[in-house]
Image (cartoon, helix red, strand yellow):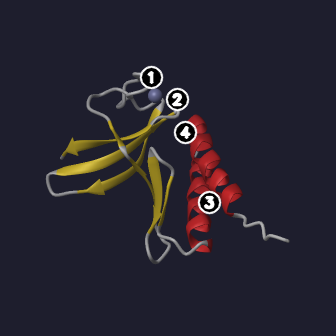
Amino acid sequence: MSCRVLPFPSQVNEVYTSIFTFLKTKNGRQRQIMLLNIRALLDEHHISHYNYGSFSVHCTADKDIAYIYGKQRGFNKYCPQCKSYLYSADGPVTILSIIEGIKTDRVTYGCNCGAIFYKWEKK
Ligand SMILES: [Zn+2]
């Protein structure tokens, strides 16, 4: 009996790795690679999002916008994992996506310690 090996798991890992490489480097080129990998994964499998447990990756129908959606909620001004301050310009925490509301935004943050989380931020 033969079986066909699908590329799904390696692509899933590639997206995962590119996200954490970006969080380590916070480099513009790594951000591009991360977003392209997310698009490629979702496009190839004709899915709009993929669930990684503590976060998920999404793409709009026109494939223009790819983004990361945190699921663990942060409650204060510090990373829930390593306690780094969120709002310093040269700090380890970076914004991964913002979903805008009328009074509050749902902001997903990523930290170079590996934490991905969201916070409701008042406008
Ligand atoms: Zn952290």
Q: Is mark 2 within 8 Å of ligand 1?
A: yes
Q: Is residue 91 visible in the rendered structure shown here? A: no
- Label 3 sits on residue: 37
Mark 1–mark 2 contact, CB under 8 Å? yes
Callout 3: helix, strand or loop? helix
Q: CA distance from mark 4 to mark 3?
A: 15 Å
Mark 2–mark 3 contact, CB under 8 Å? no
Q: CA distance from mark 4 to mark 1?
A: 14 Å
Whichever of labels 2 and 3 marks the residue nearer the N terminus, that label is: 3
Disc 4 packing (10 Å; few <14; some 14–19; many ≥20): many
- Label 4 sits on residue: 23
Whichever of labels 4 and 3 marks the residue nearer the N terminus, that label is: 4
- Residue type for callout 1: Cys
Q: Is mark 1 within 8 Å of ligand 1?
A: yes
Please determine whether, in this image, residue 82 is positioned above or below residue 8. above
Callout 1: helix, strand or loop? loop
